[in-house]
Amino acid sequence: MSDKPKSTSVPALEKAFEILDFITKSPTPVSSATIAKELSLARSTTHNILQVLTNKGVLHKDGNHLFSLGSYLLYWAGRFEVEKGVVALFHEMAVGFDVLTPYTITLSTLDFEHGETVFLSSHAGSSAIDFVFRRGVRVPAVFSATGKAILSQYPFDKVVAMYGKFPTPLTERGVADFDGLKAEFDDIKQTRLSLDNGQLRLGMTCMGTYIRGQDGVRLGIAVSLSDSEYHEHKDTIGQAIITLAQQIERGLGVS
């Protein structure tokens, strides 16, 4: 058996990127024939890819059948800039909270398709919490403070439908079923504070809340503490994290 690794390339997707790069570099709109010739692609392949990209708005075809970049790229760029702006705003405002900065503060979003919290950034403190909060790390949303804070703002039947079967708890303290999750959501709606009391990692407690944006609730922040730190400072930290979330909301233009 050969040890040669299997190729992970997707030829049609690679050709689409070649076409997009070529059009991006061109100072003027270009024809399908020119693209096929310059990139050594079959005309039929080029035509099919251009048609799909045009139908999606990624490319624009003018009255002379020449192609240029389409408006849908602005949507992607806009989402990228929003995320960059949120992360910058998060760090800028977090450092102004002396009561929070000794601890790890995380900014997260939610992958609604998979029901997972996705960490976007973190402000590291001096507290001895060794959980990894690197950008892109994913955890089940029903066990994380930010995930529960975000999900609590959506109709509960949609949350149930998102999962179908309730995820297996990661620790002995993890919420066990949808009834338990709904009870936590009811508390969040009353206090605006969510809690991961050792549900991701025993010995670590995270207090979180949601951040409202122009397109709804898709972001959350949380502070990670040892269990003893939580019991000693929960009231002060809880109010501070709500205030931080509200400041970020105002920075995003949400009143």
Image (tube, helix red, strand yellow):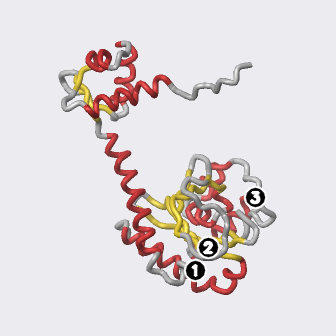
Asked if the residue at tag 2 contacts the one at tag 3, i.e. Cβ–Cβ closer than 8 Å, the answer is: no
Q: Residue, x 54% and y 56% (percent of image)?
A: 135
**Residue 215 visible in this rendered orientation of the protein:** yes
Q: Which mark is residue 118?
A: none
Q: Is residue 49 above or below residue 133?
A: above
Q: Which residue is mark 2?
A: 207
Image position, residue 184 (x, y; %)? 67, 69
As drawn, 138 above or below 1:
below
Q: Residue at x 76, y 68 (%)?
A: 202
Q: How many marks?
A: 3
Q: Hey, which quadrant is residue 201 in on the image?
A: bottom right
What whole-number distance in Å separates the C-alpha atoms at marks 1 and 3? Answer: 24 Å
Question: What percent of the width, then of the height, locates residue 236?
Answer: 57, 86
- Earlier residue among tags 2 and 1: 2
Q: Position of residue 178 (x, y in %)?
A: 72, 59
Q: Secondary structure at mark 2?
A: strand
| Earlier residue among tags 1 and 3 | 3
Judge by depth and name the residue closer to the eye, 161 or 129: 129
What type is the residue that disc 1 sits on? Gly
CA separation in Å, label 3 and label 2: 18 Å
Looking at the picture, which amino acid does disc 3 mark? Answer: Leu
Q: Give the labeled residue for mark 3.
A: 170
Q: Quadrant of the C terminus?
A: bottom left
Residue beneath disc 1: 238
Where disc 1 sits, the SS reads helix
